[in-house]
Image (tube, rainbow, N blue to C red):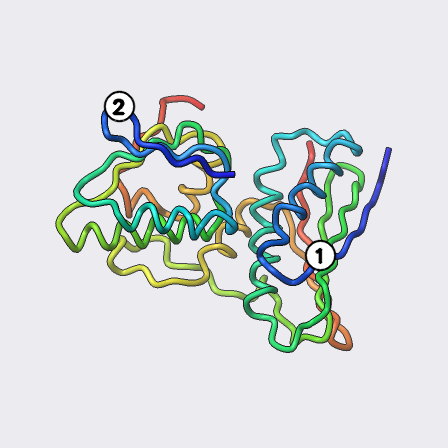
Amino acid sequence: MLDIKVGPNDEIILAGRFDASQAERAEQFLAGVTGTRVVDLGELQYISSLGLGVLLATQKRLMDQGHGLKLVNVRGHVRDILHFAGFDRVFALDSPPSA
Amino acid sequence: MMSSQQRSFPRQVASLPAVFDFIDGFFESASIDGDHRVPVHFAVEELFTNLVKYSRGGTHDIEVELRREPGRLAVSLTDFGVEPFDIRRAPDARVDLGARDRTPGGLGIHILKRMVDGIDYEYADGRSTTTIFKDLG
């Protein structure tokens, strides 16, 4: 299950598992996001290619409006997956020094 | 120790939680380090959802087999009554592009190839089997 929250500094927190069964719910939430926003992935344990597609579509939409997402606390297997996807060229990415 | 298990799942994305539970149960019974779960989940989700989306003519359930082999885990997904599709021949995605130039498709298989340690493919008489291997060392 994917947990979607907004943190105290208005950051979006994605926690748990972002798989195909959760993509529609995440898509609905992210469709309402505007401006430049931080997305905290520190508690995200898993993301599939459908999850990556939802993030990418959101980034494209926000960039067209002169904004974008910044992904922070990217770690572990999620960091590997985003690296293989070349998402360091798509998003501002912030990873802890060691994970 | 359980050395292999096989189960069939309805051809729908909604089967995924049950597929993941099946994998996790096998990890436990075969004493496989849980750190390997994410790459295996990623690969199986990618293969399974591709079969649901693209296997024209497929109406049969999708068969998932897990095998504990010396030093590695093998996971096979078999589809029936379909055209061949060998993911080893799929072109790499353009992961060097920025957001605006990205096009949908191909990214999941591109990542899958980098998260597993081997891929086999067999096809005969409409029976299509992709096997991924994960080293457990």
**Is the residue marked by circle 1 packed among few (<14), some (14-19), or many (20+) residues within 10 Å?**
some
**Seen from this angle, which residue lies furthest left?**
A66
Quadrant into which the C terminus of chain B falls = top right
Taking depth in this image into account, of B8 and B28 the one nearest to the observer is B8
Residue B60 position within the rendered picture, expressed as x and y whole percent measured from the top left: 72, 69
For image coordinates 30% across by 27% down, the residue present is A7
For image coordinates 65% across by 50% down, the residue present is B118
For image coordinates 17% across by 55% down, the residue present is A64
Quadrant into which the N terminus of chain B falls = top right
Q: Distance between the residues labelled 1 and 2?
A: 42 Å
Could you tell me which secondary element the residue under label 1 belongs to?
strand
Residue at mark 1: chain: B
Please indicate whether residue B43 sits to the left or right of residue A32 in the image: right
Could you tell me which secondary element the residue under label 2 belongs to?
loop
Residue A81 position within the rendered picture, expressed as x and y whole percent measured from the top left: 46, 42
Taking depth in this image into account, of A42 and B87 the one nearest to the observer is A42
Kind of residue indicated by mark 2: Pro
Q: Hey, which quadrant is residue B49 in on the image?
A: bottom right
Q: Is residue A3 above or below residue B79?
A: above
Kind of residue indicated by mark 1: Phe
For the image, the number of numbered tags is 2
Which residue is the site of mark 2? Answer: A8
Residue B4 position within the rendered picture, expressed as x and y whole percent measured from the top left: 83, 45
Residue at mark 2: chain: A
Please indicate whether residue B31 sits to the left or right of residue B40 in the image: right
Which residue is the site of mark 1? Answer: B9
Please indicate whether residue B34 sits to the left or right of residue B6 in the image: left
**Is the residue marked by circle 2 packed among few (<14), some (14-19), or many (20+) residues within 10 Å?**
few
For image coordinates 56% across by 70% down, the residue present is B54
Asked if badge 1 and badge 2 are on a common chain, one would say: no
